[in-house]
Image (spheres, helix red, strand yellow):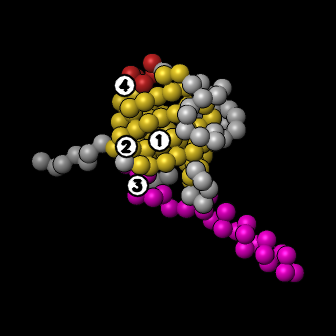
């Protein structure tokens, strides 16, 4: 009985944190400063005009389209974890990590494999975004 109660007190918070409220320092609009894929800078950066995190979704805007993915976070892990599930198609969930610091928001995720352990952006299928928050537009 004691073991069951102990297990529940350790496991239940993990499930709660997986769907926790998105922190204010993550939500917002961002400009992409750096795009690394498989350890190399990607030319795809030029096509991305903005990234928005709002209400549990990430929208990547290009001149031609918008790609949307639902995401969940877990701030009980170090580094913070983030999982993306595209809202269209049959794409798999991508496992990632994220951090916010004075230089902006950094996310590293693996499109098809295990969650990255660091923010280097190296490894097959690993993508790293380094973003700067855009200033809110003022109403005229």
What is the C-alpha distance between the residues marked 1 and 4?
A: 23 Å
Q: Residue furthest bottom?
A: 1
Q: Are marks 3 and 2 in contact (CB under 8 Å)?
A: no
**Pointer 2 residue:** 103
Residue 27, image x and y in percent? 41, 52
Q: Is 42 located above or below residue 79 in the figure?
A: above
Q: Is residue 35 left or right of residue 4?
A: left
Q: Are marks 1 and 2 in contact (CB under 8 Å)?
A: yes
What is the C-alpha distance between the residues marked 3 and 2?
A: 12 Å
Let me know if residue 94 appears in the view. no
**Pointer 1 residue:** 106
Mark 4 or 2, closer to the camera: 2
Q: Are marks 1 and 3 in contact (CB under 8 Å)?
A: no
**Pointer 4 residue:** 63
What is the C-alpha distance between the residues marked 3 and 4?
A: 26 Å
Q: Which residues are magenta?
A: 1-30
Q: Is 81 located above or below residue 39 in the figure?
A: below
What is the C-alpha distance between the residues marked 4 and 2?
A: 26 Å
Residue 46: name its quadrant.
top left
**Pointer 3 residue:** 25
Which of pointers 1 and 4 lies earlier in the amino acid sequence?
Answer: 4
Which of pointers 3 and 4 lies earlier in the amino acid sequence?
Answer: 3
Q: Name the residue rendered at 40%, 28% in the picture.
A: 48
């Amino acid at each position: 009985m004691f073991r069951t109660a102990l297990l529940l007190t350790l496991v239940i918070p993990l499930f709660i944190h997986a769907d926790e409220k998105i922190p204010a320092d993550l939500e917002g609009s961002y400009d992409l400063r750096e795009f690394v894929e498989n350890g190399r800078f990607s030319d795809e950066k030029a096509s991305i005009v903005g990234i928005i995190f709002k209400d549990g979704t990430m929208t990547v805007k290009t001149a031609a389209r918008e790609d949307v993915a639902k995401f969940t976070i877990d701030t009980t892990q170090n580094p913070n974890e983030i999982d993306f599930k595209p809202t269209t198609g049959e794409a798999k969930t991508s496992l990632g990590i994220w951090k916010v610091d004075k230089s902006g928001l950094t996310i590293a995720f693996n499109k098809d494999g295990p969650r990255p352990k660091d923010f280097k952006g190296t490894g097959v299928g690993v993508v790293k975004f380094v973003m700067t928050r855009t200033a809110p537009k003022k109403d005229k």
